[in-house]
Image (spheres, rainbow, N blue to C red):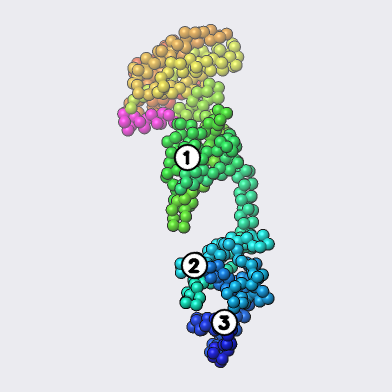
Amino acid sequence: MSAENHRGDGDEWQDAAYRALETLRATLALAPEVRDDAYAQLLLPAEVLATNAVSVAVIQADGRVLFANPGACQLLGLRFGTDPARPPSGSQEPADAEPPPAEILAFRWVATTGVPLFEVRSEILCAEGRRRILSVNAVPVAGDDQRPPRVALAMTDLTDQYAYYEQALRDSQERLKLATEAAGLGVWEYDLVAGRYHWDERMLEIYGLTEDQAPVTYEDWLERVLPEYYTRVSHIDSDQPQLGERREVEFRIRRPDGTVRHIRAVWQCIEDQEGRPTRLVGTNEDVTEQRELQHELEYRAAHDPLTDLFNRAKIQQLLRTAQASFQRHGTPFALLLFDVDHFKRVNDRYGHGAGDAVLWQMARRVESVLRDTDHLGRWGGEEFLILASHTDEAGAHALAERIRNRVKQEAFEGIGTITVSFGVAAIEPGLTLEQLEQRADLAMYAAKHAGRDQSMRFSEVDPANADSDPASGIHSSGPGRPT
Protein backbone atom coordinates (compact mmCIF):
# COMPACT_ATOMS: atom_id res chain seq x y z
CA MET A 1 0.00 0.00 0.00
CA SER A 2 1.53 3.33 -1.03
CA ALA A 3 1.63 6.52 0.88
CA GLU A 4 -0.49 8.27 -1.79
CA ASN A 5 -3.49 6.00 -1.05
CA HIS A 6 -3.64 7.26 2.52
CA ARG A 7 -3.11 10.97 1.97
CA GLY A 8 -6.24 12.95 2.88
CA ASP A 9 -6.98 16.09 0.82
CA GLY A 10 -6.74 19.28 2.83
CA ASP A 11 -5.28 17.55 5.89
CA GLU A 12 -2.10 19.56 6.27
CA TRP A 13 -0.84 17.71 9.35
CA GLN A 14 -1.20 14.29 7.73
CA ASP A 15 0.35 15.60 4.51
CA ALA A 16 3.43 16.65 6.46
CA ALA A 17 3.56 13.26 8.14
CA TYR A 18 3.59 11.44 4.83
CA ARG A 19 6.39 13.61 3.50
CA ALA A 20 8.39 12.82 6.62
CA LEU A 21 7.68 9.16 6.00
CA GLU A 22 9.53 9.29 2.69
CA THR A 23 12.63 10.43 4.57
CA LEU A 24 12.24 7.78 7.26
CA ARG A 25 11.78 4.96 4.78
CA ALA A 26 15.48 4.76 3.89
CA THR A 27 16.71 4.66 7.47
CA LEU A 28 14.13 2.82 9.55
CA ALA A 29 15.01 -0.79 10.31
CA LEU A 30 11.70 -2.67 10.07
CA ALA A 31 10.78 -6.31 10.17
CA PRO A 32 10.67 -7.99 6.72
CA GLU A 33 6.92 -8.43 6.80
CA VAL A 34 6.28 -4.68 7.05
CA ARG A 35 9.35 -3.28 5.29
CA ASP A 36 7.49 -2.71 2.01
CA ASP A 37 4.23 -1.54 3.54
CA ALA A 38 4.34 2.26 3.65
CA TYR A 39 1.27 2.52 5.83
CA ALA A 40 2.76 0.08 8.33
CA GLN A 41 5.92 2.12 8.27
CA LEU A 42 3.87 5.16 9.18
CA LEU A 43 1.98 3.46 11.97
CA LEU A 44 5.02 1.92 13.66
CA PRO A 45 6.90 5.16 14.49
CA ALA A 46 3.59 6.85 15.20
CA GLU A 47 2.72 4.17 17.73
CA VAL A 48 6.13 4.56 19.35
CA LEU A 49 5.83 8.35 19.48
CA ALA A 50 2.40 8.02 21.02
CA THR A 51 3.92 6.32 24.08
CA ASN A 52 6.01 7.71 26.93
CA ALA A 53 9.02 5.60 25.87
CA VAL A 54 10.55 8.58 24.11
CA SER A 55 10.25 12.35 24.48
CA VAL A 56 10.33 14.18 21.14
CA ALA A 57 9.38 17.72 20.22
CA VAL A 58 9.76 20.04 17.21
CA ILE A 59 10.17 23.79 17.72
CA GLN A 60 10.27 26.58 15.18
CA ALA A 61 12.93 29.27 15.29
CA ASP A 62 10.29 31.70 16.59
CA GLY A 63 9.72 29.44 19.62
CA ARG A 64 6.41 27.93 18.47
CA VAL A 65 6.04 24.25 19.39
CA LEU A 66 4.96 22.39 16.25
CA PHE A 67 4.94 18.90 17.71
CA ALA A 68 5.32 17.24 21.09
CA ASN A 69 4.57 13.60 21.69
CA PRO A 70 2.99 12.48 25.00
CA GLY A 71 6.41 11.80 26.53
CA ALA A 72 7.58 15.35 25.77
CA CYS A 73 4.29 16.87 26.94
CA GLN A 74 4.54 15.06 30.23
CA LEU A 75 8.22 15.92 30.62
CA LEU A 76 7.82 19.60 29.77
CA GLY A 77 4.33 20.14 31.17
CA LEU A 78 2.78 20.98 27.75
CA ARG A 79 -0.92 20.74 26.79
CA PHE A 80 -2.24 20.83 23.20
CA GLY A 81 -6.02 20.72 23.42
CA THR A 82 -7.44 17.21 23.52
CA ASP A 83 -4.60 15.56 21.63
CA PRO A 84 -1.18 16.48 23.06
CA ALA A 85 0.63 14.75 20.24
CA ARG A 86 -1.18 16.62 17.45
CA PRO A 87 -0.96 20.41 17.32
CA PRO A 88 -3.68 21.99 15.14
CA SER A 89 -3.04 22.75 11.50
CA GLY A 90 -3.55 26.49 11.98
CA SER A 91 -0.72 28.93 12.50
CA GLN A 92 -1.76 29.85 16.04
CA GLU A 93 -1.36 27.68 19.14
CA PRO A 94 -4.58 26.86 21.02
CA ALA A 95 -5.53 29.13 23.86
CA ASP A 96 -4.75 26.52 26.52
CA ALA A 97 -1.30 25.63 25.16
CA GLU A 98 1.52 26.25 27.64
CA PRO A 99 4.93 27.39 26.41
CA PRO A 100 7.85 25.06 27.12
CA PRO A 101 10.42 26.03 29.77
CA ALA A 102 12.80 28.80 28.77
CA GLU A 103 15.74 26.37 28.94
CA ILE A 104 14.13 24.31 26.17
CA LEU A 105 13.28 27.34 24.05
CA ALA A 106 16.97 28.20 24.09
CA PHE A 107 17.55 25.26 21.72
CA ARG A 108 15.55 27.01 18.96
CA TRP A 109 18.77 28.74 17.94
CA VAL A 110 19.91 25.39 16.58
CA ALA A 111 17.28 25.86 13.88
CA THR A 112 18.85 29.18 12.93
CA THR A 113 22.53 28.19 13.11
CA GLY A 114 22.07 24.74 11.61
CA VAL A 115 24.60 23.27 14.08
CA PRO A 116 23.35 20.18 15.96
CA LEU A 117 23.95 19.64 19.67
CA PHE A 118 24.21 16.25 21.34
CA GLU A 119 23.91 15.11 24.96
CA VAL A 120 23.56 18.61 26.34
CA ARG A 121 22.72 18.66 30.05
CA SER A 122 19.85 21.05 30.72
CA GLU A 123 18.23 21.81 34.06
CA ILE A 124 14.60 22.93 33.75
CA LEU A 125 12.00 24.05 36.24
CA CYS A 126 8.62 22.54 35.42
CA ALA A 127 5.28 24.20 35.98
CA GLU A 128 4.74 22.29 39.22
CA GLY A 129 8.03 23.68 40.49
CA ARG A 130 9.95 20.41 40.21
CA ARG A 131 13.52 20.58 39.02
CA ARG A 132 14.40 18.18 36.21
CA ILE A 133 17.75 17.31 34.64
CA LEU A 134 17.52 16.48 30.92
CA SER A 135 19.93 15.20 28.32
CA VAL A 136 18.95 16.89 25.06
CA ASN A 137 19.85 16.11 21.45
CA ALA A 138 18.92 19.05 19.19
CA VAL A 139 19.03 18.58 15.39
CA PRO A 140 18.09 21.32 12.89
CA VAL A 141 15.34 20.58 10.34
CA ALA A 142 15.73 22.58 7.15
CA GLY A 143 12.85 24.83 6.12
CA ASP A 144 11.57 25.99 2.73
CA ASP A 145 9.50 28.82 1.27
CA GLN A 146 6.45 27.62 3.15
CA ARG A 147 8.07 26.50 6.42
CA PRO A 148 10.69 28.29 8.55
CA PRO A 149 13.66 26.39 10.01
CA ARG A 150 12.84 24.04 12.89
CA VAL A 151 14.71 22.04 15.46
CA ALA A 152 13.91 18.48 16.50
CA LEU A 153 14.52 17.69 20.16
CA ALA A 154 14.98 14.24 21.67
CA MET A 155 15.04 14.44 25.48
CA THR A 156 15.97 11.96 28.19
CA ASP A 157 15.01 12.54 31.80
CA LEU A 158 18.07 12.04 34.02
CA THR A 159 16.48 13.50 37.16
CA ASP A 160 16.25 10.25 39.09
CA GLN A 161 19.78 9.26 38.08
CA TYR A 162 21.12 12.62 39.19
CA ALA A 163 19.20 12.37 42.46
CA TYR A 164 20.74 8.94 43.05
CA TYR A 165 24.24 10.13 42.31
CA GLU A 166 23.80 13.32 44.32
CA GLN A 167 22.65 11.28 47.29
CA ALA A 168 25.56 8.89 46.80
CA LEU A 169 27.89 11.91 46.64
CA ARG A 170 26.41 13.36 49.82
CA ASP A 171 26.80 10.01 51.55
CA SER A 172 30.39 9.75 50.32
CA GLN A 173 31.14 13.29 51.47
CA GLU A 174 29.64 12.56 54.87
CA ARG A 175 31.75 9.41 55.21
CA LEU A 176 34.83 11.36 54.11
CA LYS A 177 34.05 14.10 56.63
CA LEU A 178 33.65 11.56 59.44
CA ALA A 179 36.86 9.79 58.41
CA THR A 180 38.91 12.99 58.16
CA GLU A 181 37.54 14.24 61.48
CA ALA A 182 38.38 10.93 63.13
CA ALA A 183 41.89 11.08 61.65
CA GLY A 184 42.31 14.78 62.47
CA LEU A 185 42.76 15.68 58.80
CA GLY A 186 41.93 19.01 57.21
CA VAL A 187 40.99 18.95 53.52
CA TRP A 188 42.08 21.67 51.11
CA GLU A 189 41.79 22.35 47.41
CA TYR A 190 43.84 24.74 45.29
CA ASP A 191 42.48 25.97 41.95
CA LEU A 192 45.54 26.18 39.68
CA VAL A 193 43.71 28.28 37.11
CA ALA A 194 42.28 30.87 39.47
CA GLY A 195 45.11 30.56 42.01
CA ARG A 196 42.69 30.26 44.92
CA TYR A 197 42.37 28.00 47.97
CA HIS A 198 39.34 26.38 49.52
CA TRP A 199 39.63 25.03 53.07
CA ASP A 200 37.25 22.96 55.13
CA GLU A 201 36.47 23.66 58.79
CA ARG A 202 39.13 21.29 60.09
CA MET A 203 41.85 23.15 58.14
CA LEU A 204 40.81 26.37 59.88
CA GLU A 205 40.97 24.62 63.26
CA ILE A 206 44.47 23.31 62.55
CA TYR A 207 45.73 26.78 61.64
CA GLY A 208 43.79 28.48 64.44
CA LEU A 209 41.93 30.72 61.98
CA THR A 210 38.39 31.99 61.69
CA GLU A 211 36.48 31.69 58.44
CA ASP A 212 37.19 35.29 57.43
CA GLN A 213 40.93 34.67 57.98
CA ALA A 214 41.07 31.69 55.61
CA PRO A 215 43.86 32.03 53.02
CA VAL A 216 42.67 32.74 49.49
CA THR A 217 45.95 32.75 47.55
CA TYR A 218 49.20 30.81 47.87
CA GLU A 219 50.87 33.92 49.28
CA ASP A 220 48.18 34.16 51.96
CA TRP A 221 48.92 30.60 53.06
CA LEU A 222 52.69 31.09 52.91
CA GLU A 223 52.41 33.86 55.52
CA ARG A 224 51.42 31.18 58.05
CA VAL A 225 54.54 29.06 57.37
CA LEU A 226 57.73 29.67 59.34
CA PRO A 227 60.35 31.34 57.06
CA GLU A 228 62.88 28.53 57.45
CA TYR A 229 60.44 26.22 55.64
CA TYR A 230 59.79 28.49 52.63
CA THR A 231 62.20 26.58 50.41
CA ARG A 232 60.61 23.28 51.35
CA VAL A 233 57.07 24.37 50.42
CA SER A 234 57.84 26.79 47.57
CA HIS A 235 57.14 24.14 44.90
CA ILE A 236 53.61 23.22 46.02
CA ASP A 237 51.81 25.60 43.64
CA SER A 238 54.20 25.14 40.70
CA ASP A 239 55.62 21.61 40.71
CA GLN A 240 52.45 19.61 40.27
CA PRO A 241 52.63 15.82 40.69
CA GLN A 242 51.70 13.54 37.81
CA LEU A 243 48.19 12.09 37.69
CA GLY A 244 47.84 9.59 40.52
CA GLU A 245 51.18 10.58 42.07
CA ARG A 246 51.11 11.58 45.73
CA ARG A 247 53.34 14.31 47.16
CA GLU A 248 54.14 14.85 50.82
CA VAL A 249 55.97 17.51 52.82
CA GLU A 250 56.30 18.54 56.47
CA PHE A 251 56.70 22.07 57.75
CA ARG A 252 55.87 24.28 60.71
CA ILE A 253 53.34 27.08 60.99
CA ARG A 254 52.74 29.86 63.48
CA ARG A 255 49.16 30.36 64.60
CA PRO A 256 47.72 33.81 65.33
CA ASP A 257 48.06 33.08 69.06
CA GLY A 258 51.82 32.58 68.59
CA THR A 259 51.91 28.80 69.02
CA VAL A 260 53.99 26.79 66.55
CA ARG A 261 52.60 23.57 65.08
CA HIS A 262 54.18 20.85 62.96
CA ILE A 263 52.12 20.10 59.82
CA ARG A 264 52.20 17.14 57.45
CA ALA A 265 50.73 17.90 54.00
CA VAL A 266 49.77 15.30 51.38
CA TRP A 267 48.29 16.19 47.99
CA GLN A 268 47.55 15.02 44.45
CA CYS A 269 46.91 16.78 41.15
CA ILE A 270 43.54 16.66 39.35
CA GLU A 271 43.52 17.02 35.56
CA ASP A 272 40.78 17.96 33.11
CA GLN A 273 39.68 15.82 30.15
CA GLU A 274 42.55 17.20 28.05
CA GLY A 275 45.10 16.16 30.68
CA ARG A 276 45.80 19.70 31.88
CA PRO A 277 46.38 20.17 35.62
CA THR A 278 43.45 22.12 37.09
CA ARG A 279 43.41 21.48 40.84
CA LEU A 280 45.51 20.30 43.73
CA VAL A 281 43.57 18.38 46.36
CA GLY A 282 45.11 17.30 49.64
CA THR A 283 45.08 17.16 53.40
CA ASN A 284 46.89 18.76 56.33
CA GLU A 285 47.50 16.93 59.58
CA ASP A 286 48.75 18.46 62.80
CA VAL A 287 51.53 16.04 63.80
CA THR A 288 53.07 18.23 66.51
CA GLU A 289 52.56 15.73 69.32
CA GLN A 290 53.75 12.81 67.19
CA ARG A 291 56.92 14.62 66.13
CA GLU A 292 57.63 15.76 69.69
CA LEU A 293 57.25 12.19 70.91
CA GLN A 294 59.41 10.92 68.05
CA HIS A 295 62.07 13.53 68.83
CA GLU A 296 61.97 12.58 72.51
CA LEU A 297 62.37 8.88 71.71
CA GLU A 298 65.23 9.57 69.31
CA TYR A 299 66.88 11.84 71.86
CA ARG A 300 66.61 9.27 74.63
CA ALA A 301 67.95 6.55 72.36
CA ALA A 302 71.13 8.60 71.86
CA HIS A 303 71.60 10.15 75.31
CA ASP A 304 72.59 9.01 78.77
CA PRO A 305 69.62 9.51 81.16
CA LEU A 306 71.80 10.64 84.09
CA THR A 307 74.15 13.17 82.52
CA ASP A 308 72.10 14.03 79.40
CA LEU A 309 75.27 13.48 77.34
CA PHE A 310 75.61 11.22 74.32
CA ASN A 311 75.57 7.58 75.35
CA ARG A 312 78.20 5.06 74.31
CA ALA A 313 76.21 3.86 71.29
CA LYS A 314 75.86 7.39 69.90
CA ILE A 315 79.54 8.20 70.50
CA GLN A 316 80.55 5.03 68.67
CA GLN A 317 78.35 6.09 65.76
CA LEU A 318 80.10 9.48 65.69
CA LEU A 319 83.49 7.72 65.84
CA ARG A 320 82.61 5.66 62.76
CA THR A 321 81.65 8.83 60.91
CA ALA A 322 84.92 10.52 61.93
CA GLN A 323 86.94 7.49 60.82
CA ALA A 324 85.21 7.46 57.42
CA SER A 325 86.01 11.18 56.99
CA PHE A 326 89.67 10.49 57.90
CA GLN A 327 89.94 7.64 55.40
CA ARG A 328 88.31 9.60 52.57
CA HIS A 329 89.51 13.15 53.18
CA GLY A 330 92.29 12.86 55.73
CA THR A 331 90.35 14.83 58.36
CA PRO A 332 92.21 14.25 61.67
CA PHE A 333 90.58 13.55 65.04
CA ALA A 334 91.60 12.41 68.50
CA LEU A 335 90.05 10.75 71.56
CA LEU A 336 90.18 12.10 75.11
CA LEU A 337 89.20 9.43 77.62
CA PHE A 338 88.90 10.57 81.25
CA ASP A 339 87.31 9.48 84.49
CA VAL A 340 86.73 10.88 87.96
CA ASP A 341 89.56 10.24 90.40
CA HIS A 342 88.63 8.33 93.57
CA PHE A 343 84.95 8.25 92.53
CA LYS A 344 84.34 5.14 94.64
CA ARG A 345 85.21 7.17 97.74
CA VAL A 346 82.55 9.73 96.80
CA ASN A 347 79.88 7.04 96.55
CA ASP A 348 81.00 5.31 99.73
CA ARG A 349 81.21 8.49 101.82
CA TYR A 350 78.38 10.64 100.45
CA GLY A 351 76.09 8.10 98.84
CA HIS A 352 75.21 7.27 95.25
CA GLY A 353 72.89 10.29 95.00
CA ALA A 354 75.84 12.57 95.64
CA GLY A 355 77.89 10.58 93.14
CA ASP A 356 75.20 11.06 90.48
CA ALA A 357 75.19 14.80 91.19
CA VAL A 358 78.96 14.90 90.69
CA LEU A 359 78.65 13.19 87.29
CA TRP A 360 75.92 15.61 86.17
CA GLN A 361 77.88 18.68 87.26
CA MET A 362 81.03 17.22 85.71
CA ALA A 363 79.27 16.98 82.36
CA ARG A 364 78.20 20.65 82.51
CA ARG A 365 81.72 21.87 83.36
CA VAL A 366 83.35 19.90 80.58
CA GLU A 367 80.73 21.07 78.04
CA SER A 368 81.59 24.68 78.87
CA VAL A 369 85.16 24.15 77.59
CA LEU A 370 84.46 22.18 74.41
CA ARG A 371 84.34 23.54 70.89
CA ASP A 372 81.25 23.20 68.70
CA THR A 373 83.01 20.49 66.68
CA ASP A 374 83.77 18.35 69.76
CA HIS A 375 81.45 15.63 71.07
CA LEU A 376 81.20 14.54 74.68
CA GLY A 377 79.64 11.31 75.87
CA ARG A 378 79.41 9.10 78.91
CA TRP A 379 81.54 6.07 78.12
CA GLY A 380 80.51 4.04 81.16
CA GLY A 381 80.33 4.45 84.96
CA GLU A 382 82.43 7.49 85.87
CA GLU A 383 84.28 7.48 82.54
CA PHE A 384 83.71 10.04 79.76
CA LEU A 385 84.97 10.19 76.19
CA ILE A 386 85.51 13.22 73.98
CA LEU A 387 85.74 13.03 70.21
CA ALA A 388 87.87 16.04 69.22
CA SER A 389 87.52 16.77 65.51
CA HIS A 390 90.07 18.49 63.28
CA THR A 391 92.92 18.11 65.75
CA ASP A 392 96.02 16.01 66.37
CA GLU A 393 97.43 14.50 69.59
CA ALA A 394 99.06 17.78 70.68
CA GLY A 395 95.88 19.77 70.15
CA ALA A 396 93.83 17.17 71.98
CA HIS A 397 96.30 17.18 74.89
CA ALA A 398 95.97 20.97 75.17
CA LEU A 399 92.17 20.58 75.30
CA ALA A 400 92.51 17.92 78.00
CA GLU A 401 94.59 20.27 80.12
CA ARG A 402 92.02 23.06 79.86
CA ILE A 403 89.25 20.69 80.92
CA ARG A 404 91.32 19.23 83.80
CA ASN A 405 92.00 22.69 85.20
CA ARG A 406 88.39 23.79 84.74
CA VAL A 407 87.07 20.77 86.69
CA LYS A 408 89.18 21.36 89.80
CA GLN A 409 88.80 25.14 89.73
CA GLU A 410 85.57 25.06 91.68
CA ALA A 411 84.65 22.70 94.50
CA PHE A 412 81.64 20.44 94.10
CA GLU A 413 78.96 21.42 96.60
CA GLY A 414 79.05 19.33 99.76
CA ILE A 415 81.96 17.25 98.52
CA GLY A 416 84.94 19.46 97.77
CA THR A 417 87.46 19.41 94.96
CA ILE A 418 87.21 16.66 92.36
CA THR A 419 89.97 15.84 89.87
CA VAL A 420 90.05 13.84 86.63
CA SER A 421 92.70 11.86 84.72
CA PHE A 422 92.99 11.98 80.91
CA GLY A 423 94.32 9.64 78.28
CA VAL A 424 94.79 11.13 74.78
CA ALA A 425 95.29 9.29 71.46
CA ALA A 426 95.04 10.51 67.84
CA ILE A 427 94.03 8.61 64.72
CA GLU A 428 96.76 7.34 62.42
CA PRO A 429 96.65 5.62 59.02
CA GLY A 430 95.87 1.92 59.34
CA LEU A 431 94.63 2.25 62.93
CA THR A 432 91.22 0.74 63.73
CA LEU A 433 88.75 2.37 66.07
CA GLU A 434 89.23 -0.45 68.56
CA GLN A 435 92.98 0.10 68.58
CA LEU A 436 92.49 3.87 68.95
CA GLU A 437 90.16 3.35 71.92
CA GLN A 438 92.71 0.97 73.50
CA ARG A 439 95.46 3.59 73.10
CA ALA A 440 93.36 6.24 74.86
CA ASP A 441 92.50 3.71 77.55
CA LEU A 442 96.14 2.80 78.11
CA ALA A 443 97.18 6.47 78.27
CA MET A 444 94.48 7.19 80.86
CA TYR A 445 95.60 4.15 82.90
CA ALA A 446 99.17 5.51 82.78
CA ALA A 447 97.93 8.91 84.04
CA LYS A 448 96.21 7.18 86.94
CA HIS A 449 99.34 5.14 87.64
CA ALA A 450 101.44 8.33 87.65
CA GLY A 451 99.41 9.92 90.46
CA ARG A 452 96.08 11.03 88.91
CA ASP A 453 94.96 14.60 88.11
CA GLN A 454 97.03 14.39 84.93
CA SER A 455 96.60 14.13 81.17
CA MET A 456 98.78 11.63 79.35
CA ARG A 457 99.40 11.26 75.63
CA PHE A 458 99.70 7.79 74.22
CA SER A 459 102.99 8.80 72.57
CA GLU A 460 104.37 9.50 76.07
CA VAL A 461 103.45 6.12 77.52
CA ASP A 462 106.38 3.81 78.22
CA PRO A 463 105.10 0.28 77.54
CA ALA A 464 107.79 -1.12 79.85
CA ASN A 465 106.23 0.71 82.79
CA ALA A 466 102.67 -0.28 81.90
CA ASP A 467 100.88 -3.42 82.94
CA SER A 468 99.81 -3.98 79.33
CA ASP A 469 100.20 -2.72 75.80
CA PRO A 470 97.57 -1.17 73.51
CA ALA A 471 96.69 -4.51 72.00
CA SER A 472 96.01 -6.17 75.35
CA GLY A 473 92.38 -5.17 75.36
CA ILE A 474 92.46 -3.28 78.67
CA HIS A 475 89.03 -1.65 79.26
CA SER A 476 87.72 0.64 81.93
CA SER A 477 85.82 -2.21 83.53
CA GLY A 478 88.96 -4.33 83.94
CA PRO A 479 89.68 -5.64 87.47
CA GLY A 480 92.27 -3.87 89.65
CA ARG A 481 92.07 -0.61 87.73
CA PRO A 482 92.87 2.54 89.78
CA THR A 483 89.90 4.89 90.26
**Badge 3 or badge 1: first in the primary sequence:** 3
Q: Looking at the picture, does residue 211 appear above or below residue 15? A: above
222 over 42 or under it: above or below: above
Amino acid residing under circle 1: Tyr
Q: Nearer the viewer, residue 316 or 119?
A: 119
Query: Would you name the residue on which mark 1 appears?
Result: 218
Residue tagged 2? 110
Looking at the rendering, the stretch of residues picked out in magenta corresponds to: 317-330
Amino acid, disc 2: Val
Give the answer, above or below, for where 320 lies relative to 167. above
Report the quarter where the N terminus lies: bottom right
**Residue at 41% across / 22% down in the picture?**
372
Horizontal side, residue 31 vs residue 376: left or right: right
- Give how far across and how far down residue 455 sits, in percent: 40, 14
User: What secondary structure is found at the residue carrying circle 3?
Assistant: helix
Amino acid type of disc 3? Answer: Glu
Q: Can residue 270 be seen here?
A: yes
Q: Residues within 10 Å of mark 3 (few under 14, many from 20)?
A: few
Residue 220 percent across, percent down from the top left = 49, 37
**Which of the two discs, 2 and 1, labels the residue nearer the N terminus?**
2
CA distance for labels 3 and 2: 25 Å
Q: Mark 1 falls on what kind of element?
A: helix
Question: In front: mark 2 or mark 1?
Answer: 2
Q: Determine whether, in the image, residue 205 is placed left or right of residue 241.
A: right
Question: Could you give the CA–CA distance between mark 3 and mark 1, rounded to whole angstroms?
Answer: 67 Å
Judge from the rendering whether residue 192 lies leftward or rightward of residue 32; answer left or right. Answer: left
Residue 335 appears anywhere in the view: no
Label 3, on which residue?
A: 12
